[in-house]
Image (cartoon, helix red, strand yellow):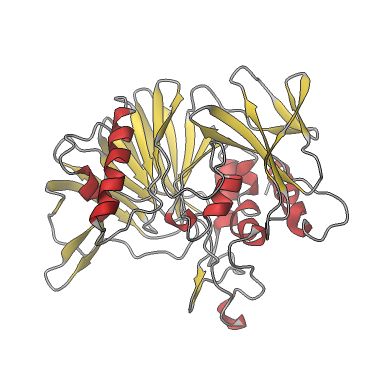
Amino acid sequence: MNRAIRNAVLSFAAAAGLAGAAAAETLHPWVVLGPQGAVVRTATTDAACPRIRYDDFDRPMQVRVGPWQDYPHTVCEAPLPGIVKSVTFAGRPVPVPPPDPQRIVLLGDTGCRIRGGFAQACNDPAEWPFARLAATAAGLKPDLVIHVGDYHYRESPCPQPSAGCEGSPYGYNWATWQADFFTPAAPLLATAPWVMVRGNHEDCRRAGHGWYRYLEPRVRPVDCEAFTEPYRITLGDFSLVVLDTAHALDQRPPQPLIERYRPQIEQARALATPTSWLLAHHPIYAIWRFEGQERRPIETNQTLLAASEGLGPDPFPVVFSGHIHRFDVFRFAGQRPSQVIVGGGGTAIDGALNDGPPSYAIAGMEVVERTSEKGFLFLLLERAGAEWQASVMDVEGRVVRRCRLEGKNFSCPQ
């Protein structure tokens, strides 16, 4: 681990004793991109928000939200105008959004799963390697990081010491957010700005309050909101459209839920340009698994598929998602975007999708190419003229698969 990454980890880890520390402590700021541009955030136990330095002048940060229940500190923020060239906090650099990103890290589903009787070995870096993965990704010096959702997974107490999670925090509080996300993600938060996508683990019945405190780029609502409007982030000659699918049920959605998501999808499509990527935690055009002796494909997400019916051709060239804990690509015969799933960022892994029939369709359109890789993986996208070269990488930075995005075709040749 190089010195910059080590310092980032120590800076974020210094907040470990926030609740009981005698002296105020403040996290090193992170940068979130949203529809109004970039915002710089930090969290502090001090009574006042700190100041941050933009180029040659200091400016105060403003209160986003104060301490509440098991969240012991104030979250502070400041808008980051595009004209700012450098940002520092306590003498250390804060990443500034580039006008035209050339190297993008994409990952998702990163927390350590403890729920009910299932416990991932959070104390074993081989079984929960998010910290290693984040440090590896930071070493690649990306211009931008995209997280496709599900940051918070420790929902129940560790069932027994032998499970490898002894002493783990759990529940909806700062200690769990710190353990599941802020401490392991520290080097990557210090390296590049982030685009944060909301997952179902951040819905209003689960970690939604933490989501709105720390990660949601827009103004914090008075209470947790189940549905938020899609928005677009323009980055040079391409853009990202972010769709909040936190409450979209995978299977058997009730009709009112389908009707609630239909205008969301219409609004997202209205924001699309020919070079827009759609970011949605739940995949729209995917296979969860194959069932039965005939290996019948189980399509997902049923809420979003049903809500998309009758809306005409999907204008996006590609949809990037998580939710399924592996790397998948589905490329179609018609004018439908490729569906890419990058859900192997640290939580318990799903098996690869390699046991299906030789050919099948999703929502009536034939899949002409499919790729599925099991493992703790992330994606590095590098600009190459009009296309993007994509490397599927493991926690050590080894390339597992090479792919390419050109138009609506995200292809991973054998």
In the displayed structure image, the side of residue 210 where residue 100 appears, left or right: left
Which residue is at a point 24% across and 62% down the rendered structure image?
252
Q: How many marks?
A: 0
Quarter of the image for residue 389 reads: top left
- 299 sits to left or right of 236: left
Q: Which of 177 and 136 is in front in this view?
A: 177
Residue found 55% across the figure and 60% down from its top: 129
Instruction: Judge from the rendering whether residue 279 lies leftward or rightward of residue 2; answer left or right.
Output: left
What is the x, y in percent for residue 137? Answer: 55, 45
Q: Which residue is drawn at 75% across and 47% down?
A: 11
Residue 285 in picture, x, y percent from top left: 24, 48
Residue 305 visible in the shown view: yes
**Where in the figure is residue 138, as x and y percent of width and height?**
59, 43
- Image quadrant where residue 290 sits: bottom left
Q: Is residue 189 left or right of residue 58?
A: left
Q: In which quarter of the image is residue 288?
A: bottom left
Q: Can residue 301 be seen in this view?
A: no
Along the line of sight, which residue is nearer the eye, 48 or 4? Answer: 48
Question: Which residue occupies the extreme right position in the image?
Answer: 22
Residue 393's place in the image compared with 207, above or below, is above
Q: Which residue sits furthest front?
A: 222
List x then y, in percent, for residue 79: 63, 28
Q: Is residue 385 above or below residue 261?
A: above
